[in-house]
Image (spheres, grey):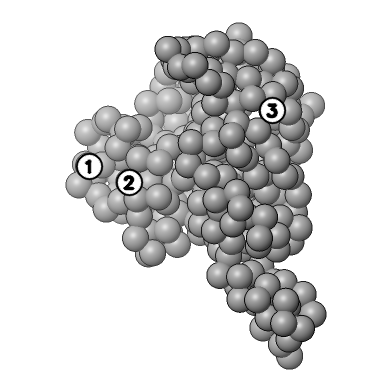
Amino acid sequence: MLPIKVRELSFKYRHSTDYIINDVSFDVEQGEFVGIIGPSGCGKSTLCYTLNGIIPHTITGDIGGSVEVFGKNTLTHEPHELSEDVGIVLQNPETQLFAMTVEEELAFGPENLGIDPDEIRQRIDWALSVVRMEKYRDAFPFHLSGGQKQRVAIAASLTMLPKVFILDEPTSQLDPRGKREVFDVIHKLHDELDMTVVLVEHETDILAEHVNRILVMDKGRIIMDGSPELVLTKVDFLHDVGVRPPEVAEVTHMLHEKGKVPRVCTTLQEAMEMMK
């Protein structure tokens, strides 16, 4: 059974005249690490909200088509019914944090599922170790740094043991160190747990290093779907869409156009190996 199956999905926010998602169809296989890119307003975040039931159950509008997560239709299942299958982390972690301590934050979800207290403690221990936040167990979440808050939000989702992890620009408000902290965690989850990950991220340099598939969105549609090597080397195409390609791709594209190098590269490591 596919982790994610989307068919002919369309969505228009209430009181809006235009569809923000327009006839989108795609599948995500078990263990895939999928990046989603596109210009602002193209529907990336809206698509994420349909994957865990926030749309249409919390955010309403006109919706058509179907979205299934492990066979459960997110249009008919409430977010709490999907919480063990799919976890989501948003751009601003403060929108997801509310408890007085990190431990209480991580315990909230499993407690609402009626999980045994001993198992909850084990899940909290494990999630804190994954995000390297063990010593902040009793800390007030809103006193933490941006990167630490985002790691707590990730840990709180992990205590639900989701099979699919959705992240909507989780590093957009972080400094370079915070970005590295969060992506180290995401990469570890994917590699060690074979977790299916869907990541919305505007920094294509980061995607080039981590994901194995990229969806390009524009005006509510998926206009390209392929490997990072296929998508991120289309420098002119990405510029036309309104997406900044990886810096390495831009430089090697320019050199390739002048006949200086044999191909366009997406990562620094790949470029260095090519230059040997």
Pointer 2 with pointer 1, Cβ within 8 A: yes
Circle 2: residue type:
Lys
Residue 41 versus residue 160: which sits nearer the camera? Answer: 41
Give the residue at x 68% y 81%: 255
Residue 263 image position (x, y, % from top left) = 77, 75
Q: Label 2, label 3: how many angstroms apart (C-alpha)?
A: 33 Å
Give the residue type at disc 3: Val
Residue position for label 1? 142
Q: Secondary structure at mark 2?
A: helix
The 10 Å Cα crowd at callout 3, few under 14, some 14 to 19, many 20 or more, is some
Establish if 235 lies above or below 221: below
Mark nearer the N terminus (3 vs 1)? 3
Q: Earlier in the sequence, mark 2 or mark 1?
A: 1
Disc 2 vs disc 3: which is toward the camera? 3
* Quadrant in the picture for the N terminus: top right
Secondary structure at numbered mark 3? strand
| Image point (65%, 33%), residue name | 221
Q: Does 135 sit above or below residue 73?
A: below
Residue 24: numbered disc: 3
How far apart are the alpha carbons under marks 2 and 1?
Answer: 7 Å
The picture quadrant where one finds residue 162 is: top right
